[in-house]
Amino acid sequence: MSKSLVVLLVGVLCLAIWLFLYMLSYSNMYIKNKLTLLMSSAFGLPVSYAYSIFATIIYCLLPLISCFILGKTAGFHFLQLFSFSYGGMLLLVIMMAVIGVMSVMAVFLMVILTIKPKMNIQEEMSKIKWIEGIFMVPAKVAWLLPMCSACFEEVFFRGAFLKGLMVSGMNTLAAVGIVTAAFVINQCILADTKVQKLILGISSFAISAIGSIAFLACGSIIPSMIMHASFAGFYTSGKK
């Protein structure tokens, strides 16, 4: 078995465990209520959003652990993902990545609303479980939750998973394609309706494609982290 295939299987397994544990925590009401009471009593958080804080911690912690596993499997150090040389190139990549993903989504939403002018995209997306949870958190800290989740998604997908596949010998285009497909599936699984899956699917494709280019351009995960965090914070900043 080739090393790249081993890395691929390890990455998929880590992703499957990550999603299973995360989804289990909110799909099982008994477990969710127990976790809510535990977080509330342990840290003095209001019951209304104690679970949302816990879910964010779990959603960030699991991919972080997976990154170390992938790094060990592929043979690179986790901190290599964050290496960069400060300068004009880094700033240019960050700026182009942010503008690129925002522009792609703006065009896509305009097309969708032209075809379906009565579609209430904001209302539809606000019904996604993790977004509903964000709306329960006080506005002054709510924006941090999706931005943190976005950063750890980048570290796993465009960082450890992509780098792991490439350093183990896989073709760059194939590695980007696999990582992008995995990310799109990851996001769509967390949605319920066809509209939610469509919006998340297109946005995830744009984020992954542009994030991968940014990572390949400067060898650091930092630009794609900033790009994805900006996107997530912007599109989840409104209240229902």
Image (cartoon, helix red, strand yellow):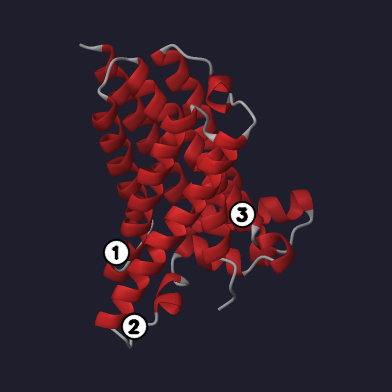
Which secondary structure, mark 1? helix
Q: Is residue 10 left or right of residue 41?
A: left
Mark 2 — residue?
119
Q: Amino acid at mark 2?
A: Met
Q: Amino acid at mark 3?
A: Leu
Nearer-N-terminus badge (1/3): 3
**Closer to viewer: mark 2 or mark 3:** 2
Q: Is residue 195 above or below residue 7?
A: below
The residue drawn where x is 40% and y is 15% is 73
Q: Position of residue 170 (x, y in %)?
A: 26, 20
The residue drawn where x is 51% and y is 35% is 155
Nearer-N-terminus badge (1/2): 2
Q: CA distance from mark 1 to mark 3?
A: 23 Å
Q: Position of residue 116 (x, y in %)?
A: 27, 83
Please identify the quarter of the rendering in which residue 216 is found: top left
Q: Is residue 107 left or right of residue 128?
A: left
- Counting the numbered discs, the total is 3
Q: Are marks 1 and 3 in contact (CB under 8 Å)?
A: no
Label 1, residues with CA under 10 Å away: few <14, some 14-19, many ≥20: few
**Closer to viewer: mark 1 or mark 3:** 1
The residue drawn where x is 36% and y is 68% is 107
